[in-house]
Image (tube, helix red, strand yellow):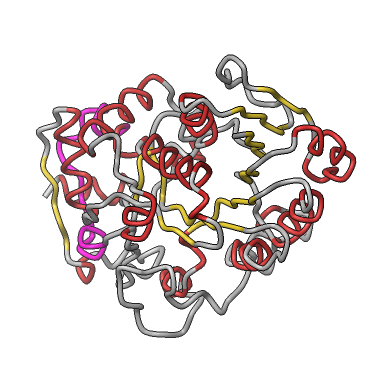
Amino acid sequence: MRVLILGGTRFIGPPVVRCLVAQGHSVTVFHRGLSTTQLPLGVESVFGDRRELDRFRPIFKAIAPDVVLDMNAMCEQDALDATRVLSGIAGRFIAVSSVDVYQAYGVLLGLEESPPEPVPLVEDSCLRTHLYPRRTPDTKPEDFAYGYDKIPMEGVVLTQPDLPGTVIRLPMVYGSGDFRHRFYPFLKRVDGGRAGIVLPESIAKWVGCWGYVENVALAIALTVMDERAAGRVYHIADAEPINELERLKRLAAVVGWSGRFIVVPDALLPDWSPPINFAQHWTVDSTRIRQELGYTEAMNMQESLKRTVAWQRANPPSNLELATSDFLLDESLEDLWLST
């Protein structure tokens, strides 16, 4: 099978490429050439900017991909451009999306005025009515956050008459190469010798959806390799949803930290206000991809956490602003509770 990947050189893309190559598929990656990622031997690169896709149509036609995997379609225009250029060339089109398309995400951010949505979410759960969730009154039209929204992007992908589409909705992804450094705030405290970590009760009980990058990559590769994925929407997420306290306890066990977790009722934290609505849990049901395409995790959670911790310790963020956490208190506020 000939596979063309748009993007795919930063975090999730490289393990997807490795999965496909290991299965004997021919892979070409269209990217800007800005990443230092080493792609497997035999993978072809086409260098270019997706804002100029039209001029690459002759090259894509020569590749004649059976499947196109778009790892980087962030908005409606991205999907419109890609499907227009590749229609009549590719056999199928797969777009990577996010579970932030759901109304539950709008409730989580306080954008939707409705009670918490029931979870786990399924692929047919209600979508957000509030579009462009990252846009604020101060966001400029040229900013990424201004146009970002996967909902209209998905709408384009799933309605092309001559290019069968698939949408894959991802959770919060962790693992080697995580440019958001999701585990760093916790590891910084543990490695700094803190005796305890204080969690507001609402955070301790909150359950989100997560996925280890190598497992996520395997699931994405399955949609590429299986024609039954055409026309379908799939969730990818860890099979076992756990709350934040349990997630941090498992991290603590992996790193051998013997400190204590202190869970404090929100009402006793007058100087703290929740950054999001933790009454809205954010979990998804991934049964569909497991039953239809035979997906199962290649690596269990303990090993996934262990590998992620090893990578994170070896690769601290150069910009600490990229490694903030909505799930941990400010250290000065935490110190007040640890000293009592």
Q: Does 112 appear in magenta?
A: no
Left or right: 244, with 87 as reference point? left
Q: Which residues are magenta?
A: 188-206
State the residue at coordinates (77%, 43%).
50
Q: Nearer the viewer, residue 295 or 73?
A: 295
Count of marks overlaid on the render: 0
Left or right: 261, with 271 as reference point? left
State the residue at coordinates (13%, 51%).
262
Q: Position of residue 95 (x, y in %)?
A: 59, 52
Q: Residue furthest bottom?
A: 114
Vertical arrangement, residue 317 with respect to residue 295, above or below: above
Q: Residue furthest top?
A: 41
Q: Position of residue 105 (x, y in %)?
A: 45, 68
Q: Nearer the viewer, residue 199 or 303?
A: 303
Q: Nearer the viewer, residue 249 or 222?
A: 222
State the residue at coordinates (25%, 28%).
306
Left or right: 293, with 223 as reference point? left
Q: Does 198 appear in magenta?
A: yes
